[in-house]
Amino acid sequence: MTTPIQTQAVLLTPAAAEIVRGLLQQRELDPTYALRVYVAGQSCSGLQYGMALDNKPSETDAAFESEGLKVLVDNQSLQFMAGAKIDYIDDERGKGFLFENPNVPPACSCESGTCGSSEN
């Protein structure tokens, strides 16, 4: 059984929710499916995120609703994603999901040669 939380740790914009609903419908998935969001790794350009449609939540998952959709986040990812917003864009930047995470400082450029160091 997942642990429901009272606050929304990760918010979906209406545009992102519409795309997720379309994917659920297109794949003919039943209402037991949720959007799983997780931190997939970290690189010089910041955190890398993953998303999946999942109907097998873990006992340690945080579960909540955003824009009428079930959202699952594992406890480890939740530490890095609390307060994040997921949008869907289709503009000059491209097309896809965009994560806006207030917990992550701006990514370094790597050209400075200090990426990953503790120097300021």
Image: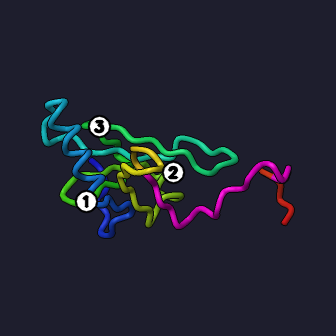
Q: Nearer the viewer, mark 1 or mark 2?
A: 1
Q: Are marks 1 and 2 in contact (CB under 8 Å)?
A: no
User: Is residue 60 located in the magenta-colored stretch of the structure?
Assistant: no
List x then y, in percent, for residue 73.
39, 50
In the drawing, what numbered circle is on residue 117?
none
**Residue closest to the far top:** 27
**Depth check: 5 or 115 in front?**
115
User: What secondary structure is found at the residue carrying circle 2?
Assistant: helix
Q: Which residue is mark 3?
A: 54
Question: Mostly what secondary structure, the magenta segment?
Answer: loop
What amino acid is labelled 2 in the image?
Gln
Res 14 label? 1
Lower position in the chain sequence, tag 1 or tag 2: 1
Residue at 81 percent across and 49 percent down: it is 111
Q: Is residue 14 left or right of residue 84?
A: left
Residue 102 magenta: yes
Residue 44, position in %: x, y? 70, 47
Residue at (30% x, 60% y) in the render: 13
Residue drawn at 22 percent across, 60 percent down: 67
Q: Camera-side residue: 32 or 1?
A: 32
Disc 2 or disc 3, which is closer to the eye? Answer: 3
First reached walking from the N terminus: tag 3 or tag 1? 1
How far apart are the two marked residues, 3 and 1, measured between alpha carbons?
A: 20 Å
Q: Is residue 44 left or right of residue 37?
A: right
Mark 1, residues whose alpha carbon is within 10 Å: few (<14), some, or many (≥20)?
some
Please provide percent x and percent y for residue 19: 25, 46
Mark identifier at residue 76: 2
Amino acid type, callout 1: Pro
The stretch in magenta equals: 98-114
